[in-house]
Image: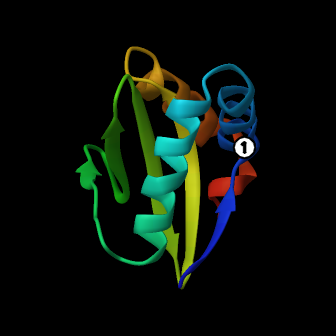
Amino acid sequence: MRDYKFTKQAFKTLTDLSKNAPKIASHIKEIITNLRLDLIEGESLTGYAEFKKLRTGKYRLIYTLRGEVLLIAIIEKRETVYATFKHLFKKSAAFDD
């Protein structure tokens, strides 16, 4: 099983969902487990080839692989996920090698 890491944004969102919407959080956790086991793969993110996206209900999960580490970059509602991703991508060291 592949190791994994969350950005601060992804961890905070998943923690908040665990408290406020446990069914959604559980589904997202299941998707992360499947990603760690290579059972599913997302679609490439336009303009950011190393990142992939997965739809999970009203949410999108954006992730990338760094060697054997799965980096969960963003967990956000579909309406705002891309703007949030672009903002965090420009400002965050979490995406640097």
Q: What residue do we see at 66% from left, 37% from top? A: 14
- Mark 1 Cα-neighbour bin, 10 Å: few <14, some 14–19, many ≥20: some
Q: Residue 40 at what x, y percent from top left?
A: 28, 66
Question: Three-letter amino acid code at disc 1?
Answer: Phe
Provide the residue designation for mark 1.
Answer: 11
Residue 97 makes an appearance in the image: no
**Image-quadrant location for residue 59:** top left
Measuring from the top left, give residue 28's x and y in whole percent. Answer: 49, 44
Colour style of the rendered protein structure: rainbow
Q: Residue at 70% x, 36% y: name it.
A: 9
Looking at the rendering, which quadrant does residue 15 occupy?
top right
The image position of residue 44, as x and y in percent, is 25, 54
Q: Is residue 59 above or below residue 68?
A: above
Quadrant of the drawing holding the C terminus: bottom right
Question: Residue 31 in the image: x percent, y percent?
Answer: 43, 54
Residue at the far front in the pictured view: 23
From the viewer's side, name the closer residue of 25 and 65: 25
